[in-house]
Structure formats: C-alpha cells, structure tokens
Image: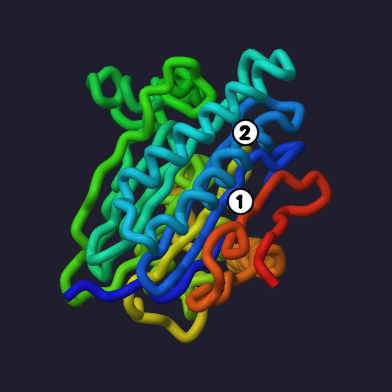
Amino acid sequence: MPHQPKGVALCSLQGKRERQEDAAFCLLLPSFCCIAVADGMGGLARGAQASQLAIEALARAAPRLSRGARAEEVLKDAAAVANGSILQLKTREQLPAVGTTLAAAVVQAGTVTVGHAGDSRIYLISEQDVLQLTHDHSLAQELVDTGAVGDTQEARKAVGGVLLRGLGEEDFPGLEITTTALPENSAAILLACSDGVHEQVTPADLLHFAWGSPSLQAFVDAVTALALSRGSSDNITAAACEIGSFPRAASVASPVVLAPAPERRRKSPLLSVGVALLLAGALAFAARTCVFSPRLAGQKAGPAGLLSVPASPAAQHERKEAP
C-alpha cells in the first residue's frame, strides 16, 4: 500500500526582486498533508497581498479534510473564496492588474489531488523519475502545445510570462483539478514551486537532489539555492511533502552542471574551484534563510497549523508557525 506523509518543509527567497510576492503553505496532520505555492502579480506590494489571500483561504479550508471533506471540494472552495477576496481588493483600491497563481496539492488515502491556476507547478518525485502533475496556464505553454516553439524556455523568451488563468479574474473558471494514485510501496516527494524555481531547475535536478539531500529541508534549500545560483530574476519558492522515507544521502550532493563550455579547451583548476565555492556558498546561504516545518500531527488544525511565507521587504523569507 502507498506510504503515508511523513514531513513537510518550505523555502522562499526574495532573490533579485525588490519585494517578495510569493507565499507558501504546508500542513501535515495524521489523515492528510497539504502544500501550496502562490505567486502574486501586481507590484507595489499588491501581488504579495493577492498571494497571501490565496494561501490564507486554503489554510482556513484545509482542516475540513480531517472531517471527511473531499480534497477536490476543499481546493475548489478555497480558490473561489480567494478569488472573491482578490476581486474585492481590486475594487476597493482600484487596482486593475492584481492577481496570483496557485498550485496546491493534498495527499490523502493513497492519492494526491492537485489544483492549480497559472504557471506555478506541482511535481511528484518518485525514486525513479519525476512526474509534472500540472500543465501551465500560460501563453508560453500554449505556443509549445501548438508546436509553434520547441520548449517553454524558448517560448517565454518570445512572449514573457503572460498567464491565461489566475486568481483575481472576474470570469475565473476555477482551478484545474486532477487526482493521481501514489506509487505502491515506494517513497516519494511532492513539490510545489513558483516559476522562479522551475525556470532554472530541471526535473533531473529535482531527482538528483531528492536522492542527494540528507533531509527534506536540505532538499528544498538545495533546489531554491540552485535556482538562485543559476540567475533566477524572480522570487524563488518551494514547498514539499515527503511520503514515506525517501532514500537519503549523508550530505547534500553537488549541483548538477548544465551549461557546457562553448569550445573544447582545458579548464583552469582555479576556475573550477571558484565555481564550486560559489555554488557551495549559495547552498549555505539558502540553508541559513529557510527553516524546517516540524511535524504538525497532534496540533490543533486550522490557522494555528499554518506555515506560510508572506511578503517581507527586509528579509529573504519570513516564517509563520504555531507556537
């Protein structure tokens, strides 16, 4: 039978942006696990408000899962409430372009139910491979789907990060929701992340760090640090849930190197050492700014179980957790 959720962790870096507009959520109780990432849009801190409204709506709705509510209903209801709150914010403050993505996942009874809008993603990392459980609601993804361009990276260079669905729309159609069976007798890691992560970090990187990290927190720290070291210009946020006991290494593996040299020539030993030190420094920096979420089993459900990362102009990340 499928393994049960064991732990949760998150990390959010402000990165090169002037403000933090991502928000994230983790909740682990005996009967379920819920994780989510929201990436706000709108500037002047309004994007931060939008993403936080989405996360707060989900945090209020999630405890219903322990009382028998279906995951699909909880995700749909939370998104509808959040969308209404964002529309009220836009009307009250006369803000035409405020919204947020949302990618949320619930692990319960051997399945993972995913709801998403926008280009934040959910990945299921098994011991053998990585499965993307979401399909971006973006113009870039549509260009890829129609065959106009070869991949989303190329498409984003052409059209930018234009979204085709997101919370904060008058005609918001709701989250796209799917349910997937968890692997039988195999551990896994469920990852929610913003585009600041997946634009720089590949599925191969995720599998590499899943195997090569001594803990779930070390995994999300390594993933976000790699995105930062590869030049992400966005906020960088990841939230994860471990299902079963994923095979662990004794220490964090070295980052995967993707960029080949432009021509064949001997590498300077000093240059190689310098690159290694730079990447190691990025990993150490992320480890100092991200904090593990302890298991919340046995604690009172509801906002007290909330672990979220709201906007913070003064720090790379900010943590909220029950005492």
Q: Which is more N-terminal, label 1 or label 2?
A: 2
- Seen in the picture, residue 232 relative to 305 is either above or below; the reply is above
Extreme residue toward the front, this view: 67
Which residue is located at x 54 percent, y 71 percent? 217
The residue located at (43%, 16%) in the rendering is 171
In this view, which residue lies farthest toward the bottom?
Answer: 250
Residue that label 2 marks? 50
Image quarter (top left, top right, bottom left or bottom right) of the C terminus: bottom right
- In the rendered structure, the answer to whether residue 110 lies left or right of residue 60 reads left
Residue type at mark 2 is Ala
Pick the residue in front: 174 or 212: 174
| Numbered circle sitting on residue 228 | 1
**Is residue 195 in view from this perspective?**
yes
Horizontal side of 94 relative to 280 (left or right) equals: right
Q: Is residue 146 above or below residue 110?
A: above
Residue 13 located left or right of residue 157: right
Q: Quadrant of residue 150?
A: top left
